[in-house]
Image: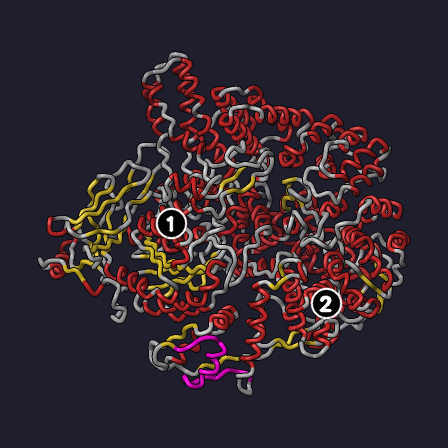
Amino acid sequence: MTKKSFLFLALVLILLSSPGIRVAAQESAPNIRVVVDMVQLNVAVTDNKGNYVTGLHPSDFAIVEDSIPQKLATFGEGNEPAYRVADTSSTSEKTSAKAGGQEPQADPKSAGEDVSQSLGSMVAGANVFLLFDTSNYMYRGFVFAQDAIADFVRSLETADKVAFYSYSRDLSRSAPLTPDREAVLRGVRATVAGDDAALYNCLLLTIKDASHFTGRKVVVVFSNGPDNSSMVPPEDVAELAQSTGTAIYMISTQLARLEPVSTAVFERMTAATGGKAYFAKNWRDEQKAFASIRDDLAHLYSLSYYPQPNPNRGWRGITVKLVGERLKKYHIRTRNGYRPQPNRFAAGTTTASASEAGPSNQ
Amino acid sequence: MKFPRCLPTLPLVLLSICLSTCFSATASSATDSPRSEEPDTNPSQAASVVIPGPLRSFMRMAGISQKAAPEEVLPLLAHNVFAQGYEGSRDGGRPTEFLILLSRYVHQAKELAALVGPDGSFRVSNCDEAKPLLHTLGYRVRQDCGAKHTALVTADPERAFVTIDSGFPLPELELTLQGGKPFTYAFPASRVPVMFTESDWTTLNSESRKGSRDLIETFLHDPLLCRLYWALSRTDAESRVALQRSVGIGTLLPVAAVLDFYGSHICIRSGRVIVPGGAGAASAWKDLTGASPDSPREFVARLLAKDNGWLAAYFDALSRVNQTQQAHFTEVRLRRFYESFRGQSISPDAARPAFRPAPALLLLMTRLQWQPSGEPYVPGNLEVWKQILQQKSDSKIIRDSGKRASHIKNPEQLAETMFALCRVETETGPLQIYLMLSELDSKRSPENRLSPQTVLLMASRFADFSNQYLIFSEFPELNDESITRFLNVAESLGKIPNHTLRGNAMGIFQANIGMWQILARQGQIQSSALNDSWQNVIKPFGKVLSSPQLFEAGSDSLGELLLAATGQRSGSQDEIIDLLAGPRQATPDGQRMHQEVANEIRSVMDGQRLVSLDTILGLGDGLDAMAHGAAVGDSLVPLAGELREFEMPRPIFSSGERTQWATGVYNNRHTDLQMRTDLTKVIKAPGSKQQLEDARGQLCPFLRDTLVGLNYAYYEPPGAQILHINPLFVRSHDFSGDTVAGVDRIWQAPQLFGEGSPAGGGAHLVGSLADLPYVLAQVEQDFIAPENVQALIWRELVPGLLINAILPRWWGVSQSELHAITLYQRSGEELLTASAGDPQLRKKVMTILSDRMDPQVSARVETALVTGRLADVDPRMTPADSFYLAAEFRRRFPGQTDSLGPANQELESLSRRDPTELSWDRLSQDFGVPHPILAQSYSRELLNLKPFPAFEGYSSRLLAETWDSNNLYWARLADEKGYSAVMLNALVPQLTHRMVEKIFASDFEDWPAMLRAMRETGEEFRQGKIASLSTGVSITQP
């Protein structure tokens, strides 16, 4: 059995063994059937000062998809593994111990200023895909950007796995997703300078790779911005990231600010996917950005739900709110929707029922 | 390919390579003649130069594939320095960043070499020991050295850049500085073979003569010398030595550019230049050059210098065509054709541009058709050609030819005129018309040749419709009437004044024709019905003046298409997709493959979110029924709702920003119109008869997109992303050229717009559906990620490879055919093996191979055979070479192959049993590749040509079309693994995709890199790592 087939089978088994029965949103049209297995959300909750709010529990969140209230299937906070919300017998103790009826805490240390704190525990469980622009646009900052990325990789000590890709006109998968940091660092240092830049083409491929994995996944892009070769527009890339639950973070320098198109895309695409864009003075000054991303990864709530029947085959808006007056003062950042992927006929699915072969995560 | 590693006795004929490696015309009369050993194949014995630092690092910096052989390093360095090292023309140009970095690396490598220990390695155990090394590398230690978090950071950006770009193992050094094990890194100087001796080259450079520069440094400063080195490295070893001794490399220096473009086929054997056309052409060449081929010194010097290189260009082109074609160039023709080609002006130089100019010369020589009388072929008659030549033109050469056209009395003079037009830079001149129409007629029976009127008609419309003619060369059954009707209808559609209607009409019309082409190609429209069905599909578009008429025409045309293919006028979208996926299959494998192909098409249609044909046609029928009084409105409302389901991608830019940042690129008027279409009102009202009729017309843009989408989906390249991700891709196809300025030939192959314009909404096509497979491959190729660091997807090479994998389908291929493909290749290998010990057989073998191989490759193969180093043959021979060798040998020497080995015996037996199925024509059609540029057709064919070089205007597209090994090789692999032939429909795209990932070429003429990638892919397949079909069609993800 090939790797892909194995992954597909494994995914199906995992889903079938989960408490939430797969919900197939049967559509009215006879020849289109959209299947959505599970929607996964990474949610950042912050106070007015940008400090992360910790200690919330499942009942504090309300999720609405296209005005249809959703039931939380799993819940997790920070580096702790997510647990099943519906399975109260196994989670009640944990939930009560965790929440304990206490007020949620704003974590002032998590505002991205204290780089010296142990990062090891902050990003556990996340699959982090790094994408490095090696095009001509990065020529002058190439070595400094590489130093910065190496720093970032070193700091991701306990993230589950890290992949390192680079791109100019074409994508190079320098270090496939691996727990081996040295392999990633070798990939970083093995990059060569290229020519044209096809950021959105290569970001698309990176997101597709990331989508094969369950759990929290983020793509961190290191780029000065311009794209002169992509065939695919950023809108499609953003939608794919949203639909696969992949948060995008963009790390750039003020040079990117000189090109308003890139600035606009970076800020809007990252916001739409629940990530952030950073524009440091130069590549040697990215520590705050790195710390902020690490903090994000460490403090994100991980929520998931199986969508209630929804006839909408197009874009489905997601709203996440905090329940109760005491929490209204806090802010939420997460992706704002997704488009079901009617990928019924992908290669390799002939042995499975065509109508059931769809992406496992949305 | 397996060969015995050595022969029982090494033949004592090391010096007896026959002349066949140059030109076949001489081979038949050649005797084994003394010859120096190929120095290229014995690098250990050749002179060498030292390159500072590891070869791997140097190759990285010099832009040389890591998989290149050591003997290729200096030639490729030389090539890259002159091709990429300088820009601008003042004072020889200024160094590019590439050259600056390479120079920096060479200096840095020398500095590093001074730091290594006696054993040539760096050894660092602690921070103090690392200091001098770090300084040279341009790095410093951040934080306390020896600590867990010790890291290296840039201290000197210039040095650090070179350190990284050359692949220095910085992470390992970093680990040592963190307290890890000692760092050890071998940093040996590398020796690579040099042509002749180092001083032969350095003495040609004034600075180097003073002794201050070695060869590498000399190369970095002397692009002309580099070009000469590269040029000579492309010649065969014996000729190279002869050139050095007789002409002298100093004499060749001023003509290095000419030698580079046109020198690879200059062959010198036994003190004579072997000229194309053979001995019979020698006197003509003597006349043309003013020197005898028996005197290489004078002949070569004059050949290269004469007429600013144009005579050399002519010599080279003729040398590249096969022996059968060369034989037509008799002495008289040789001179006359050249004089015509040369013309009155020899400016600009033949070697001045970045790529070889005048590609039409090689195309004409290669594809010139001949009448049984021996005269050049004339499509139509001479009278129509006089008119064609008198067409208006901006080119003085064409105008002059037009003035002389009335004096053309015979085919020879017409051919001379065509040679005169070879230097005109145009895609639509009389020569291009001649080549196209000759190809059309070459596939037709004598009684079915194009009439003079049709020739004239096609010529008069050539500028607008030439790319559309590809379909007529693919289907020679289409007669004059079919061609005429097509042109008349197409012209009338192109003149529709309303832009929206015109675009929709052109789209629907071409989409239906495109599907006709697919079904005809797959044999689902009977050969006897091709003309009628073609005309029936076209006919409904004859009088389209309004959108309702267009909808009617599109529906009727589709009905005619289905009628021709299935016997019924109607069919659901699913049924049409099943039809496009291929003929119905009886075997389980066939059915599985058929479903797989159909599902791929459906997947693209889903990705594009196109409205189902069932919905569109259902609405059309329903509205028509309502217009005639039927009360079917309730059933139509849900269908009308489906038209409004499409949503634009979530916008990132405001409309103002798009206007500002993507002016002239972003235009989705077509989609916007669709999104405003709401038929529910007219259905619910219900509207008047006219309103209902108009409502049918509003379905046209939807019908267009879905039909066009089916064409796109059918030609989906392996690894495609846009087709699945960008739902505006099909909708944005601009058929009428409204969205961009400057595209006026809207029936020609589509052009790509929107690339690299983030606010532009993505890439989209403007133009027709002609050449769609190629253009889609162009769009999707960059979604293939190269496997090797620094490797590229070669833009004009890869699309050709991809369409070779997509366009052919293997529904009607038998197991015998599949096995025969294997047997032919193995038989060729047996022939080679046998020829190693048999000089007479070897002569025959090499004569045949000389039609497919450059002299250098041919000489290397022959040397390997003579010396018994059969392992050296393996990397030179392509599967197509082996295949052709066996086929041609059997044709020329019937009955002489039985004793050569088991494959030959089995092939002989199989051929006797089923001669038709194993005929050349059948195998060529089933396993060949399309040649839309070279042979003006999408017909699949094995042409047996030498690899074409890169040309101005075509770049390497011609090279890609002369690469025909893939499908033969994939078929062999499938046969060896026991797959049924029908599985090739899935295997070939996957294996080709994998091969493209593996191509690690130094430049786009690096065909050995393609061969290497193909073999590596095959090896992975054999090991079961990729494309295993045993558990469902899938390919292992990287």
Q: What stretch is highlighted in magenta?
A: B120-141
Please give left or right for residue B704 compared with residue A276 in the image: right
Q: Name the residue under label 1.
A: A265
Q: Residue at x 77, y 33 (%)?
A: B389
Q: Name the residue under label 2.
A: B864
Please give left or right for residue B73 compared with residue B421 in the image: left
Please give left or right for residue B241 compared with residue B606 in the image: right
Instruction: Report how far apart the C-alphas of labels 1 and 2 lie in the structure.
Output: 58 Å
Residue A88's tag is none
Q: Is residue B997 above or below residue A153?
A: above
Q: In this view, does B436 lie above or below B332?
A: above
Give, as a three-letter code, the residue at label 1: Val
SS of the residue under disc 1 = helix
Q: Residue at x 67, y 78 (%)?
A: B212
Task: Please provide percent x and percent y for residue B518.
Answer: 56, 36
Task: Please provide percent x and percent y for residue B365.
Answer: 77, 46
